[in-house]
Image (tube, coloured by chain):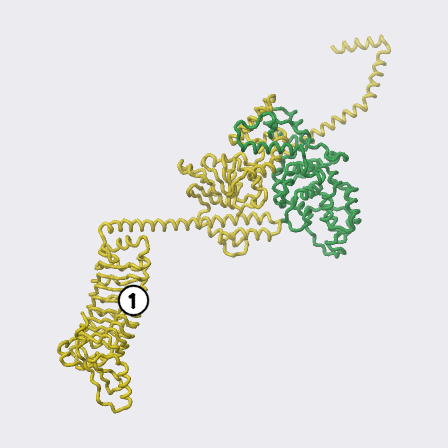
Chain colours: A green, B yellow
Amino acid sequence: MEDAVSQLLENREDISQYGIARFFTEYFNSVRQGTHILFREFSFIQATPHNRASFLRTFWRCFRAVGKNGDLLTAKEYHCLLQLLCPDFPMELTQKAARIVLMDDAMDCLMSFSDFVFAFQIQFYYSEFLDSVAAIYQDLLTGKNPNTVIVPTSSSGQHRSRLAPSECSPLDGVEASLFYHCLESLCDRSKYSCPPSALVKEVLSSVQRLTFYGFLMALAKHHGINRALGALPDKGDLLLDPPMDQELEKLLSQVSGLSISTPAGSSGDIANLPTRISPRISSPWKPLHHCQKVNIESDGSTDETESSEN
Amino acid sequence: IQTSSVAERNKPFEFRINKDQSSFHNRLLQHDLEKNYSGKQDNINFGSSASITAFPILHRATDEKILNSDRLTLERQKLTVCPVIDGEEHLRLLNFQHNFITRIQNISNLQHLVFLDLYDNQIEEISGLSTLRCLRVLLLGKNRIKKISNLENLKNLDVLDLHGNQIAKIENINHLGELRVLNLARNLLSYVENLNGLDSLTELNLRHNQITSMKDVDTLPCLQHLFLSFNNISSFDNILCLADSSSLSDITLDGNPIAQETWYKSTILHHMMQLRQLDMKRITEEERRMASVAARKEEEKKRESHKQTLLKEKKRLTIGNIARQWEIQQNRVALVTSSNQDKKDSDSCQINGSAAYEFPEETRSLDTILSNAVHGLSVLDSHLVEVEGDTLYLYGSGALESLDRNWSVQTAGTVITVSFMFIEFDEIVQVLPKLKIRFPNSAHLKFKETNIVMLQQFNALAQVRRIEQLTVDPQGNPVVNFTLWKYYVLFRLNHFNLQKINGTEVTQNDIVMAERLFGILAHVASSELPQYRLLSLLGESRKKQFCYMLEAKGKRSGIVSEESNDSKRVGGENASQAILNYTTRELHTEKLEEIKERKKFCETYIQDLVKEATDINMKNESLQKLWPQMFIELVRDAVIEIRNKNSYMKLCLQRITDQK
């Protein structure tokens, strides 16, 4: 509501032309469809899980073509693409996502679209959760018992210099079951969105020990978590989107048609040109996965008070 | 002056041999001598003296002596030494041509000698001439003389021929005031100087030497003929003294490097107006006139090119200064933003970037950089604007102001390319609309060291009216490192019909690929944005179009297609692309500030509304709870009232009267 009013104030001259009621209709329609985050500032996009999921989905839809083309890009270039949709998207997040894909190694490496998008999803949607996990992981590494309440610090990527001797070297990681125990308590009391603890258990039960980035990578690749989020399709279907492909074909034919330059132009009836008067495509939120019910709104109520200002 | 004629050679000479042959030594000597002179002529007899010097003594027959009392020819006699010539004190002409003489000796007694010819011998040093005060002609050509010396007493010398020797320096001739002809051809001279004192010299032959420069020629008052063929003279500056000589009328310079130059003849003629013959060819009046004109032009050209070099140097320094300032700016930005990042990274990439600008090796401390900056700023400009050919060059952010200058229509019309260097792209964005107006023919934009880092920045280029070529230099523009940047440019600016990007032609495939990669983005942007956002993202000009389209709802598809077709043909932007615009960082931060304030207001406003709503809701719920009870009480009260009809009637009447 706050954002709606804020938008209203920002564009009052234009909106006054066609009425406030219509404005609110459109606004909440777009929220439902997940298009409200287009070209908005980062603080808004980050504000609610629904916004985050919508953003992820939009990113996927807009740049799926890049993935389909098979180009491998650097983290910086992916960041550029993100900036096309959100001009002030912070580089930090992209780099953290890249670190997950590259296992914290050689940050200038090229990444494929699917790798990046799934890692980015985990990083962006669960960023606060991941910060806490990082803190817990550090504590476990150094042998401290993290059952006390943990307040995540802002920088999760830095290595704190603890002098306490640890039994396990960072390469070995931590013991999976102990890790799960800590995470479970975290999930129970966390105010931020977390992956369903059952699925986390699944991830952790398959290995004895694991590193921090190993864990994140496993989260990124887990199909169940992806479906629970509901923003992106399964990995296998990542490059498929038939309705969009149809639109694209029309655009392409128009582009190549124009360059052949028949002055009569394309015939008016079939040209489904990219202007907004073309009939609204149906909600992009039509369920991707028929089995799971997407319950996004459940977290929404508590998030009003948590929208960050910076 | 001739040597003795052929006929005279047959005159008998006699060489008496000394009768004293006591010593075995002498006999041997005589034997040796006789062996040497085996091919002698009959009439020449060489005697051997008993003295250890063993010089042959020459005697001539008396009648021979009387006939040719003043001349003696000893040509081709296979002499290795000069013989002693007895009793010929009146000799005036002596010819020793074509022998093997190594030293000039035994002629000191011929004090009336006027003509001495030692051409083609093996003399290594000039000597033994100090008594020949009457000598006028001295021919020492084709010998092995290394140094001019021992000519002090030959004050009457008229002709001195030293050609074909090994002389490297002109010296010891300054006293020869009567000398008219000096031949130093085929020697080893590289400098000509020390010619003063030769007040009678009319001919100086210096052919076939290694001369590069000359001095003092203007001190020769009578010099008319100067032969300098086949030397190493390459510039007229080295023989400037020739121009000062008023007597010279005939010079040769062929075979020198200077003679190969295009300006050779004109320069010589221009500087030496008195010259009558050059390289053995007469000079006509016409030639002279043309030469002076040409020479003047040459000088002007030189002055012009000198000016050009100065200007170029200044330009180079200015550009270097601008580059330095740019570096400092980048460093400052990098140091500020790298407070969270690894300092090493930013330092190393700055060092890489500066390599092209001849930066001295220095540590990247802010202090040294700043001190350099202070140096440079005080001396030179901090920006440069230049029109060269069809290109407008802008260096440094100060140059952007020059776009407001009053450019002449002609200049403005010729500019096809605009090149930006050392300017932040965000600053350029603000002046792009001006380009349309000021330089209507500009079709090619070049960016180098302009800090283009995001694909989004290319959206700003849509403000220009027309681009056919785009060049983004990798230097200073990190965006070029991205794989997709060209396709994005093609997609975003496809209504401009770009022909070339960074020099390579744009193919149909490229355009299709660009659309394939980014077409969906445009589609999503246009079809899924709520209307009010659409209007706010587009500029004022497009709003009208959209309002028009809003009204014509009934004939949607038809109009839409027409409009888009038209706009594409005319070169206008598609609505979907127009949404993709770029706001510079500063404007964006301003916007964010506004948004923050608005958010705060909205928060309080909504919270108030929410409170109100909850209040009302609470009241509603309370009412719902309390209503049944209230209703029952109402009914009970009413029933109690109406139980007694009479008293109720009275009560009502009472109520009515009370009301009044």
| Residue B568 position within the rendered picture, expressed as x and y whole percent measured from the top left | 54, 31
The relative height of residue B179 versus residue B497 in the rendered view (above or below) is below
Identify the residue at image location x=48%, y=51%. Answer: B374
> From the viewer's perspective, is B55 left or right of B624?
left
Quadrant of the image containing the N terminus of chain A: top right
Q: Nearer the viewer, residue B278 or B622?
A: B278
Q: Quadrant of residue B555?
A: top right
Element marked by disc 1: loop
Would you say B277 lies left or right of B523 here? left
Query: Splitting the image into 4 quarters, where does residue A195 fall?
Result: top right
Quadrant where the C terminus of chain A sits is top right
Say which amino acid is labelled 1: Arg
Q: Is residue A96 or residue A306 the one in the foreground? A: A96
The x and y percentages for residue B646 are 85, 8
Q: Give the letter of the chain under mark 1.
A: B
Dot 1 corresponds to which residue?
Answer: B186
Residue A185 seen in the current view: no
For the image, the number of numbered tags is 1
Estimate the x, y position of residue B494 in percent, counting from the top left.
54, 35
